[in-house]
Image (cartoon, rainbow, N blue to C red):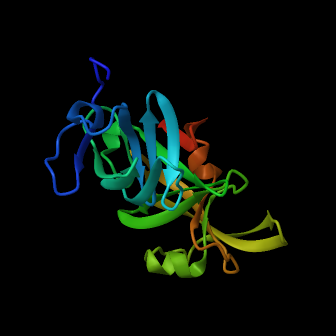
Amino acid sequence: MRNNLAVCILASLLGGVAGHSLAASGVIDDEIRVLGLFKDAALLSINDQQRMLRVGDHNKDMRLLTANSDRAVLEYRGTRLQLQLSDAGGIVTGLPSTGTSSAHLISNGGLYSITGSINGQLADFVMDTGASYITMSAQQADQLRLDYSNAKKIMINTANGKATAHVFTIKRVRIGGIELQDVEAAVMHNLESPKILLGMSFLGQVDMSQSSGLMVLKHRN
């Protein structure tokens, strides 16, 4: 067992005492750190090897049972453990403080998605570098109470050919810890995506990089 553990988790046996690392508690003779928590997924470091686990994924040693942005339940070598992030630099999804100036999008089948907000209202986004604007359906715009009645009408190219879009400006868009103001958006009446497309009107103003199954966005200084 290692003498100097970098304890980046609060971990306990379910029903036990929270606040001990897995190795330090003596339950598991491995160093397991929680690097990120997401809906139905967790990014772990196991003996310094990063692993992205999704609910349902398992092998003979471990199985992720549940996960959200607050905690995860992991079955590891026959022991069921509850994991939480500490304050030691882990990744938290959802809506962290804008002071973090970054966002982490998890990949699901090659598509990167995240829950953010538009004008303070929660919105589900999927990253789309092929979209010129933040793009949504008329129904999504109505749910967010966005007024695009005076929007400029344009023709844009889509995978299915040309389509009419109404382009207008959103006051505030927040993704993770990044908040941008006066971001251009488009409403397409025939858009079938269940999530709002996070296009280049937002992505063009941030720096992007990929790491361990995540897309990392950082505010451009």
- The x and y percentages for residue 150 are 56, 74
The residue located at (44%, 34%) in the rendering is 46
- The x and y percentages for residue 70 are 30, 54
The answer to whether residue 34 shows anywhere in this view is yes
Q: In this image, 145 relative to 25: left or right?
A: right
Above or below residue 93? Residue 8 is above
Q: How many marks?
A: 0
Q: In this image, 184 relative to 132: left or right?
A: left
Asked whether 169 or 213 is in front, the reply is 213
Above or below residue 163? Residue 4 is above
- The x and y percentages for residue 66 are 39, 61
The residue located at (46%, 49%) in the rendering is 62
Q: Quadrant location of the N terminus?
A: top left
- Residue reaching furthest to the top: 3
Above or below residue 121? Residue 13 is above
- Residue reaching furthest to the right: 161
Asked whether 141 or 150 is in front, the reply is 141
The residue located at (34%, 32%) in the rendering is 29
Asked whether 122 or 155 is in front, the reply is 122
The residue located at (39%, 66%) in the rendering is 122
Q: Quadrant of residue 36?
A: top left
Q: In this image, 75 relative to 23: left or right?
A: right
Q: In this image, 84 relative to 30: left or right?
A: left
The answer to whether residue 220 shows anywhere in this view is no
Asked whether 49 or 141 is in front, the reply is 49
